[in-house]
Image (cartoon, helix red, strand yellow):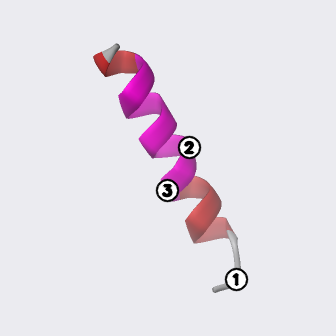
Amino acid sequence: MSCDLSLLVYLSCCALWESPL
């Protein structure tokens, strides 16, 4: 579960960084 959560957070961070906010 830790791995999945970490991966999800990583992907979310990436998406936020890529998004022009």
Local crowd at mark 3 within 10 Å, few (<14), some, or many (≥20)?
A: few
Q: Secondary structure at mark 2?
A: helix
Residue for badge 1: 20
Q: Secondary structure at mark 3?
A: helix
Residue for badge 2: 11
Mark toward the start of the polypeptide (1 vs 2): 2
Quadrant in which the C terminus is drawn: bottom right
**Which residues are drawn in magenta?**
4-13
Question: From the viewer's perspective, is residue 7 above or below residue 4?
Answer: below
Q: Secondary structure at mark 1?
A: loop
Question: Can you name the residue that lies furthest to the top here?
Answer: 1
Residue 14 location, x and y as percent? Answer: 57, 55
Residue 8 location, x and y as percent? Answer: 50, 35
Pointers 3 and 2 in contact (CB under 8 A)?
yes
The amino acid type found where label 2 is placed reads Leu
Question: From the viewer's perspective, is residue 17 above or below residue 8?
Answer: below
Residue for badge 3: 13
Question: From the viewer's perspective, is residue 18 above or below residue 13?
Answer: below
Q: Is residue 6 left or right of residue 12?
A: left
Is residue 10 rendered magenta in the image?
yes
- Find residue 8 and name its label: none
Q: How many marks?
A: 3
The image quadrant that residue 16 belongs to is: bottom right
Residue 13 location, x and y as percent? Answer: 49, 56
- Inter-mark Cα distance, 1 to 3: 13 Å
**Residue at figure coordinates x 70%, y 83% from the top left:** 20
Secondary structure mainly formed by the magenta segment: helix
The amino acid type found where label 3 is placed reads Cys
**Residue at figure coordinates x 43%, y 43% from the top left:** 9
- Inter-mark Cα distance, 3 to 2: 5 Å
